[in-house]
Image (cartoon, coloured by chain):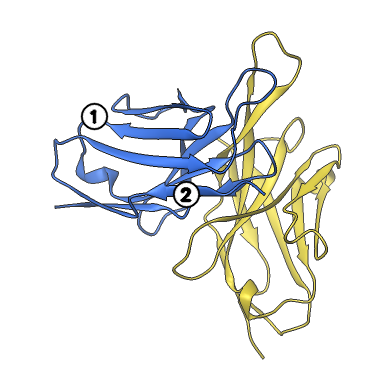
Amino acid sequence: QVQLQESGPGLVKPSETLSLTCTVSGGSISSYYWSWIRQPPGKGLEWIGYIHYSGSTQYNPSLKSRVTISVDSSKNQFSLMLTSVTAADTAVYYCARLNYETLAGYSNNYHYMGVWGKGTTVTVSS
Amino acid sequence: DIVVTQSPLSLPVTPGEPASISCRSSQSLLHSNGYTYLDWYLQKPGQSPQVLIYLTSNRASGVPDRFSGSGSGTDFTLKISRVEAEDVGVYYCMQSLQSRTFGQGTKLEIK
């Protein structure tokens, strides 16, 4: 079955750019939406954004000015960049695949986060 | 922005007893297509979250039938008919009508 693995630096300095990659194994990145979610220490979940394998994106409005999500189909990977980080960006970062459900009578599908990676901890500190 | 509020935030339950978690949104999650855009996720201790329910009441693949979701508009409920020890963790509801927003989480523990 499909598995996701986050990777990237565990420590980032304030004002610098956080960069993470999610590698998809056991399945193709094609035909799906892919998402990033984060969880600050001891706190709840925050959705960051998602990307379709074709490249279309949607971001959390509160992070939109600092976030870029990209996809590399040749490597079966997608990535997250978060600029100008502060201590508030310290969190466990998860990547996820959005499963889809066909909606009866409609051409659109419904997407939900069906497969998650194990998460990677990123600390912002000098 | 749609705000999602869960209650209670802590839920001690005796094994075998039912449990119920409430989720309320600041505006209706009913899409123009007639579907209501609300999911439930469970994060077990030390694990990544996993989907339980999508589109308000659809159980995800592999989810035991003791879990059920219901609701409409702005009021939603996740019910566990008989709690088992493996159900401990933090339950989150999430709206996906506009962007995506999680509730604060409800921590279920065994008495």
User: What mark, if any, has residue B5 been given in the picture?
Assistant: 2
Q: Chain of mark 2?
A: B
Along the polypeptide, which appears first: circle 1 or circle 2? 2
Please state which of residues B17 and A111 is positioned toward the viewer in this rendering: B17
Q: Residue at x 78, y 64 (%)?
A: A81
Q: Residues within 10 Å of mark 1 (few under 14, many from 20)?
A: some
Q: Is residue A41 visible?
A: yes
Q: Residues within 10 Å of mark 2 (few under 14, many from 20)?
A: many
Q: Residue at x 58, y 40 (%)?
A: B95
x and y percentages locating residue A39 in the rendered image = 54, 62
Chain B tint as drawn: blue
Q: Which residue is mark 1?
A: B81
x and y percentages locating residue B94 in the rendered image = 54, 43
Q: Quadrant of the C terminus of chain A?
A: bottom right
The amino acid type, in three-letter code, at marker 2 is Thr
Give the SS element for disc 1: loop
Chain A tint as drawn: yellow
Please state which of residues A107 and B35 is positioned toward the viewer in this rendering: B35
Q: Chain of mark 1?
A: B
Tell me how far mark 1 sits from mark 2, CA to CA.
Answer: 22 Å
Q: Is residue B39 above or below residue A14?
A: above
Q: Is residue A10 visible?
A: no
x and y percentages locating residue A112 in the rendered image = 60, 35
Give the SS element for disc 2: strand
Please state which of residues B110 and B10 is positioned toward the viewer in this rendering: B10
Q: Residue furthest bottom?
A: A126
The amino acid type, in three-letter code, at marker 1 is Ser
x and y percentages locating residue A19 in the rendered image = 75, 67
Q: Residue at x 56, y 43 (%)?
A: B26
Please state which of residues B72 and A14 is positioned toward the viewer in this rendering: B72
Q: Nearer the viewer, mark 1 or mark 2?
A: 2
